[in-house]
Amino acid sequence: MPESALTKLETAAIRDPASAMEVLLGTLRRLAAGTSLEELAAPEAPQPNGVLATRCAAAMARIMTDPATRFDDSAMLRLAAIARVSDHIHAISGFGNADHVLRMLGAGDTDGLGRLFEQDRRAFAKAWLLFSLDSRLPIDVRALLAAPAPIALLAAMGLISQKPILTEDGHARREALVSLAGRLKPVALPLTVDHLVLLSAAWMLCSYAGARDKHGIKPVLNRVLRQWGESIGLSDATPPAIRALKTRPTLLVVAEIMHSNHVQYRYFGQYLRQLRQRFHLILLTEGAPADTHVQALFDENRIFKRESGTGYFNKLVEEIKSLNPDMIFYLSVGMRHWGPVLANFRLAPIQFVGLGHCASTFVETIDYFFTEEGFVGDPDLLSEQLVLLPDDSLIFERSPHYAPLPASIRETANPLRVALASNLLKLNPHFIGVLRKIRARARRPVEFHVFPNVSGLEFQATQRLFDHHLPGSKIYPIKRYNDYLADLNACDINLSPFPFGGLNGVVDSFRQGIPLITLEGPDLPARLDSMMLRRLGMPEWLIAQDEEAYIAAALRLIDDDAERVALSRQILALDVESVISGDASTPLRRDVVDAVWWIYRNHEAIKASGRKVFRAADRQVFP
């Protein structure tokens, strides 16, 4: 029987330290690309994932601590790009984390890391790259700021993009790190897609923290992104001397993710139908996901194929320049690694971003943030000028795959089933700690049903997270939308996470008559649910302003069947589909197209004004 890849790793760890690092990097790269532990161990007899992860972690410890292992600058940079896979392996393994490896390296605490920096720079780099936010070692993440480049930036990016975070201490460390990260020095990254993926993950995932200054790292990363792009030959488009106004301008819509099963299609579908009335609409996106339902919304579709190297970036930028768009609308920035790169270049005279990722970009070449007014609490938390729409203008595009499912309201719920219909990124340990308090105070059994929208190692790590903090929870794998809706339909209430809430979860829940509770904050991600609840006329007590109010609202629904059922019936009576859903047959409003047309006609005056916010009433009198 041929040796498995896992056995080859174990053998190299013991017998061939000179080449063991190459074997380890190759193994981690495969896991990062989606290879499962079972596939890594094939054709061996099946073993539990915990056993396979423990074998992998043990081999890693041997390799990382053996003085004979070759660990040069190239290996360090390659490990930095994929080091977060180590968190998943250790979380699933019997070790729980990589603390034992840090101790063996001599980095058992913050002072130990300082001594290691003076004595063995290679071991110092290994320690920071293996360090997890969930470490139980007394290590202060602020010490990372004193580390030399590029380790400081690479390790910080890896830690900010760690998911899931399994402990309250880990959550606190990330909050501290995102607040400090703006002090990191930008450095040139290796010109590889792996390193770009690492950077763009940190760029996006800082949004899931709760600190007010959580986006402080973005200006640093934007300088790195711009330099990375220039290093491979990217450049701005040449602006026209005078911007000539056209009767039907070209609007390029850059969609990092866009298919008819995705929330972006649901949120932006009616936007695009409106915009096509006055603009020549071109879609730019990647690969097969842009199905016929998506493509039908545009006049032209430019679909590119991602390649293993960086050359496709040059082709992409040149294609955009050849289209000579009058405006570029980024539905989101950060959900794919190529998005933040493009956004950091001026490829059209006017560039604006939508709510697709619910976070400000802090990119100098993005002019406007374009969304509904109720999503914005504190305008100072965004870097762009804000062009805001009335809340009642938001109509969701109905998914062509949606099949209505009769609601199943349980008059008596025992146990009461709580839906956590949120992706893994939003399920932070502090929020889970609040859920523990709710379950402990409830007067009846509570059962959590978790829909984290992950697979593979991340799904297994999610199971470990909930087994530890909320045992008895049911964790669901990724499913097709209608199958997910059937599982959600069996739940009684939905507790939306914080500080990053949901949006489409309100629609999904209300279709099935499921009440939802949210905690409102000043930033975009903390206002998604509250805007929708107010838009639909729900009682204000469902929108908590602090954690105790959130807990009280949850217990009010959990403990009182009569109130819960009455609220479910009130929700069903709304007929959400008729209020906030539409398709090609729905009469189009004009809020979106009129606002974008106003930007197009008055861009120079808007920029010169220095004014931060423009609401519908402001646009009627300006300029």
Image (cartoon, rainbow, N blue to C red):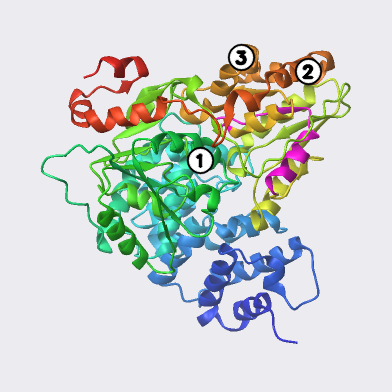
The kind of residue tagged 1 is Arg
x, y percent for residue 539: 65, 12
* SS for callout 1: helix
Name the side, left or right, on which 195 lies relative to 476. left
* SS for callout 3: loop
Of 53 and 395, nearer the camera is: 395
3D distance between C-alphas at marks 1 and 3:
36 Å
Of 353 and 15, nearer the camera is: 353
x, y percent for residue 202: 45, 48
Residue at the extreme left of the image, as rendered: 241
Indicate which label's residue lies in the foreground, 1 or 3: 3
Indicate which label's residue lies in the foreground, 2 or 3: 3
The kind of residue tagged 2 is Arg
Indicate which label's residue lies in the foreground, 2 or 1: 2
Residue 448 sits above or below residue 67 on the image: above
Q: Residue at x 44, y 20 (%)?
A: 390
Name the residue tied to disc 3.
537
- The quadrant in which residue 64 appears is bottom right
Magenta-drawn stretch contains 10: no
Magenta-drawn stretch contains 492: yes
* SS for callout 2: helix
Name the side, left or right, on which 172 lies relative to 95. left
The kind of residue tagged 3 is Gly
- The label number, if any, that marks residue 398 in the structure image: none
Mark nearer the N terminus (2 vs 1): 1
- The residues colored magenta run 480-503
Mark nearer the N terminus (2 vs 3): 3
Near mark 2 (Cα within 10 A), the count class, few <14, some 14-19 or many ≥20, is: many
Name the residue tied to disc 2.
564
Name the residue tied to disc 1.
174
